[in-house]
Amino acid sequence: MFFVSWGSKGEVAEIGPAGDRHCDRCNQDGPFTKMVAYRVRHIYWLFRWVTDRTPFLLCGRCGSQYLADQGDHDAKQERDAIPFWDRRGWTIGAGAIGSVIALGSIAAAADSAADSGYVQAPHVGDIYEVDLAKMMDKPEARVMRSAMRITAVKGDSVEVAVANLYYDDWRGVDRDITSGKAAQADYYAPGHASLPVANLKRMRDDGVVYDIHR
């Protein structure tokens, strides 16, 4: 189940001195401070934005609060007094997501470049994630995600062993590779097939091969 963490909280920020004034509550003259009360709304505390800004004056002697009048109201000062993280947190959240997307794109490009090199110079032990359905005239299922392992490299051809099981999505094969299960000999069918090295590139370009592990 997926939960979205969201909410809001009230905060107060100091704008600056407002000079000496008379406080009707403590009936004394003394220093006042310009303040702003605001509400921070958030999603996962990463995306934050400010609403409900209310400027007020604070008595330095008794702490009494008074709503700021027109002469004490300065929108820019109030905005600048609010910490950047509260005021512009949404841009950091958006930037973080953008960075993740950019890093993902860079990683995908690097992975693609590596796979391109692997099919041109295969090594014994390379494991290819393949869709067996695209290798058969009459497949048992529409999608048959499986593994194919290079067992020998002989000049312009390779010998491969094909796993004796398949999945309906890529996660099963990835799990077997990560756990080391796909590195075991009994994971594959007994017979080996011979393929020209040029066919590996064609299989990758045609989407038969969708990832390579070395």
Image (cartoon, rainbow, N blue to C red):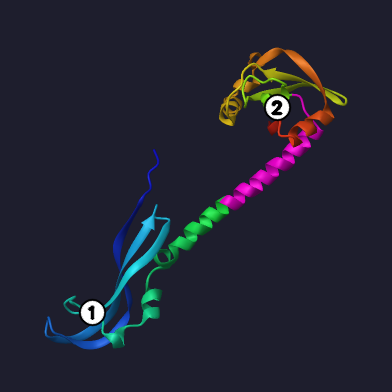
The count of marks equals 2
Image location of residue 140, percent across then percent down: 63, 19
Q: Residue at x 53, y 58 (%)?
A: 95
Image location of residue 9, percent across then percent down: 30, 60
Where on the picture, by quarter, is residue 181? top right
Going by the numbered disc 2, the residue's amino acid type is Lys
The region drawn magenta spans 101-124
Q: Residue at x 83, y 28 (%)?
A: 197
* Furthest residue toward front: 138
Instruction: From this view, report whether residue 157 is shown above or below residue 12.
Output: above
Tell me which label, 1 or 2, sits earlier in the chain: 1
Quadrant into which the C terminus falls: top right
Image location of residue 166, percent across then percent down: 61, 21
Query: Is residue 117 one of those drawn in magenta?
Result: yes
- Per the image, the residue denoted by label 2 is 134
Is residue 11 in sight in this rendering? yes
- Per the image, the residue denoted by label 1 is 67
Quadrant into which the N terminus falls: top left
* Side (left or right) of 86 relative to 163: left
Q: Residue at x 75, y 36 (%)?
A: 205
* Furthest residue toward right: 155
Q: Nearer the viewer, residue 208 or 57?
A: 208
Element type where label 1 sits in the image: strand
* Side (left or right) of 209 relative to 103: right
Going by the numbered disc 1, the residue's amino acid type is Leu
Q: Residue at x 37, y 57 (%)?
A: 42
Where on the picture, by quarter, is residue 18? bottom left
* Side (left or right) of 10 relative to 90: left
Chief SS of the magenta region: helix
Is residue 214 in sight in this rendering? no
